[in-house]
């Protein structure tokens, strides 16, 4: 998707919700590209909300650019209430999975199972094994970033912009989030596309 098509798509929405995220192991040489894109999008799309998970690397770099324009337009979906809270501006919106109604989590479980069957064993045992409970919060958070949780005032994402693993963009949490987007019919823009904007 080129930039003109992207703009045309997001302008169809009154308040577009744009996912901005990717891998934690962001090469330092690419970091400025994510910061610059975050800043550019925040300037050029004044009605947009930018949703992220507050992970190190890509999430943090995109958010840095958006914060330069308006941190109040950042929406953080967190696995736990205090997840990297020092990286979040006071004016940014934040909500943790643990603060959402059980129905939102169960919906996330359903969509996680559909998108990424490799997580089914972890999800089935999450209430019995503490370490799996902890790990499952991150993958369920990734799902909610896409599908939203209307009970908590979170609309589904409009579009997703990702900085993925070059060799295997469908790997890990970023790959899972991309699969959920595709499952929900939400357009996905990978770095090979947006780096040419």
Image (spheres, grey):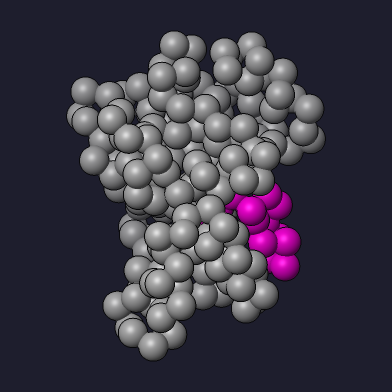
Q: What residue do we see at 48% from left, 12% from top? A: 197
In the image, residue 83 lies at what x, y percent?
Answer: 37, 64
Please tell me whether residue 47 is drawn above or below residue 136 in the rendered image.
above
Magenta span: 143-156
> Count the marks: how many?
0
Can residue 70 be seen in the rendering of this structure? Answer: no
Image quadrant of residue 162? top left
Which residue appears farthest toward the left when viewing the image? Answer: 28
**In-image side of 93 versus 17 (left or right):** left
Q: Is residue 179 magenta?
A: no
Q: Nearer the viewer, residue 115 or 12?
A: 115
Can residue 117 be seen in the rendering of this structure? Answer: yes
Q: What residue do we see at 63% from left, 20% from top? A: 6
In the image, residue 94 lies at what x, y percent?
Answer: 53, 59
Please tell me whether residue 54 is drawn above or below residue 73 in the rendered image.
below
Q: What residue do we see at 47% from left, 18% from top? A: 193
Q: What residue do we see at 39% from left, 72% from top? A: 122
Q: Nearer the viewer, residue 5 or 179?
A: 179
């Amino acid at each position: 998707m080129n930039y003109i098509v992207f703009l045309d798509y997001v302008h169809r929405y009154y308040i577009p919700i744009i996912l901005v995220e990717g891998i934690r192991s962001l090469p330092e040489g690419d970091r400025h590209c994510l910061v610059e894109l975050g800043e550019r999008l925040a300037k050029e799309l004044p009605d947009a909300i930018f949703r992220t998970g507050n992970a190190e690397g890509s999430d943090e770099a995109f958010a840095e650019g958006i914060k330069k324009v308006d941190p109040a337009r950042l929406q953080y979906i967190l696995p736990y209430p205090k997840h990297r809270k020092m990286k979040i501006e006071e004016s940014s919106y934040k909500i943790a999975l643990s603060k959402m109604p059980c129905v939102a989590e169960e919906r996330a479980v359903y969509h996680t199972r559909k998108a990424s069957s490799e997580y089914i064993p972890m999800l089935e045992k999450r209430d019995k094994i503490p370490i799996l409970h902890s790990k499952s919060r991150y993958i369920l958070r990734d799902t909610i970033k896409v599908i939203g949780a209307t009970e908590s005032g979170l609309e589904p994402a409009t579009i997703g912009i990702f900085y993925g693993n070059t060799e295997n963009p469908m790997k890990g949490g970023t790959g899972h989030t991309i699969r959920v987007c595709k499952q929900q019919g939400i357009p996905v823009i990978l770095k090979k596309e947006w780096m040419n904007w």
